[in-house]
Structure formats: C-alpha cells, structure tokens
C-alpha cells in the first residue's frame, strides 16, 4: 500500500522558518520520522514538497493511479486555494490534512480551511507529530476503504 505525503509552500524552510511557531525540526528530519512510521505501519510512502500550487494539483490528479491515501500539509494554500480543494475532492482518495501549528489558535485568516470539508479529517497543532498521526490515520483509512489491496 502506497501513501502520498505532500508538503506545501514554504515548508522546505522548516527549521529556519519562524521556529517559535514551527519548531527547529527541518523537513529532512520530519521526512525521516515519516519513513520510520511508514516502516512500522508496513506502508510505502512517497514524499513531495512544492511551493507551486499547479505542481501540487498535478501530483494529486495523478495520485489515484498509484496511491491509496494522501497526507497533506497544504500550508498557506489551506486558506486560499479553491483549486487544491477541488483537486482533493476529485481525487476520490482518503486524505488527511495536517498542520504543525494549531491553526485555530492563530490569526483569524488561518482559522478557516478551504481543505477541511473535503478531507477525512484534520490534525493540527502537534508539531512534527501531526504528520505521524496523519500518516497513521491515512493508513487506517486506506486499509478500511480497501484501496491499494
Ligand atoms: C501551516 C499553517 C499555515 O497557516 C501556514 O501558512 C503554513 C504552515 C502549519 O503547518 O502549521 O505554512 O500549515
């Protein structure tokens, strides 16, 4: 079973980017933890990061052929992208939205997610653990849906 993990814009800067909010773990470190959790769960993961909305859309559009579920941190596109929301709705795969910070405890504009209504659930506020919890949830959803058997 394969799960696609998508990191949205500016997440390549983790570790240096507003560490008071996002912590000191870099993306490589988060990706290593994801690989460990994937091995524990017995799932294969493919991880991509992009700052480009269109590239994320293309990855999601192609995901149905290869993947059983998606874990996505849409980053700033969470709050702005109808296109990303539509792509996830069209993908027809279980998807989990994750955020390092608790978006509901921050600025008003971050409290609204355009993505949340079209995914299975949202995990927000646990730092890098949000990704690991998201991966566990995605693997469970995929197994229960029978996709990727
Ligand atoms: C984020 C929260 C978003 O509001 C922000 O634009 C990000 C990161 C998070 O992981 O906490 O880039 O998605």
Image (cartoon, grey):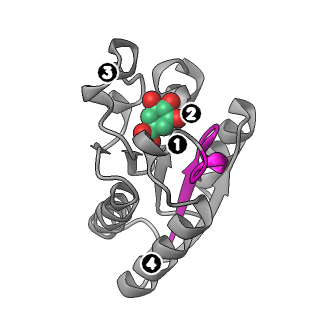
Marks 2 and 3 sit apart, C-alpha to C-alpha, by 21 Å
Q: Name the residue nearer the viewer: 107 or 147.
A: 107
Q: Pinpoint residue 149: horizontal percent, then vertical percent.
A: 43, 76
**Given contact means CB atoms under 8 Å apart, are the residues at marks 4 and 2 in contact?**
no
Marks 2 and 1 sit apart, C-alpha to C-alpha, by 6 Å
- For the question of whether residue 146 can be seen, the reply is yes
The tag on residue 87 is 2
What's the residue at 64%, 37% (across, down)? 9
What's the residue at 34%, 61% (across, down)? 129
Q: Pinpoint residue 109: horizontal percent, then vertical percent.
A: 39, 14
- Disc 2 vs disc 3: which is toward the camera? 3
- Disc 4 vs disc 2: which is toward the camera? 4
- Magenta region: which residues? 1-16
Residue receiving disc 1: 91
**Given contact means CB atoms under 8 Å apart, are the residues at marks 2 and 1 in contact?**
yes
Q: Name the residue nearer the viewer: 72 or 94.
A: 72
* SS class, disc 3: helix
- Judge the density around disc 4: few (<14), some (14-19), many (≥20) Cα neighbours within 10 Å: some
The tag on residue 38 is 4
> In the rendered structure, which disc, 4 or 1, sits on the residue that comes first in sequence?
4
Tell me where residue 10 sits by quadrant: top right
Marks 4 and 3 sit apart, C-alpha to C-alpha, by 30 Å
**Given contact means CB atoms under 8 Å apart, are the residues at marks 4 and 1 in contact?**
no
Q: Pinpoint residue 13: horizontal percent, then vertical percent.
A: 65, 47
69 relative to 124 in the view: left or right: right
Marks 4 and 1 sit apart, C-alpha to C-alpha, by 22 Å
**Given contact means CB atoms under 8 Å apart, are the residues at marks 2 and 3 in contact?**
no
> In the rendered structure, which disc, 4 or 2, sits on the residue that comes first in sequence?
4
Residue receiving disc 3: 111
What's the residue at 59%, 59% (across, down)? 27
- Judge the density around disc 2: few (<14), some (14-19), many (≥20) Cα neighbours within 10 Å: some
């Amino acid at each position: 079973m394969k799960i696609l993990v998508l990191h949205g814009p500016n997440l390549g800067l983790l570790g240096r980017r507003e560490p008071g909010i996002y912590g000191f773990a870099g993306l490589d470190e988060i990706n290593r933890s994801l690989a460990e959790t994937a091995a524990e769960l017995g799932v294969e993961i493919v991880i991509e990061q992009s700052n480009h909305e269109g590239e994320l859309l293309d990855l999601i559009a192609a995901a149905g052929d290869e993947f059983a579920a998606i874990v996505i941190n849409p980053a700033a596109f969470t709050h702005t992208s109808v296109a990303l929301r539509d792509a996830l709705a069209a993908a027809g795969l279980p998807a989990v939205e994750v955020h390092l910070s608790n978006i509901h405890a921050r600025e008003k504009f971050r409290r609204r997610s355009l993505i949340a209504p079209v995914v299975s659930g949202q995990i927000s506020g646990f730092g890098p653990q949000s990704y690991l919890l998201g991966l566990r949830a995605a693997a469970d959803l995929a197994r229960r849906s029978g996709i990727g058997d």
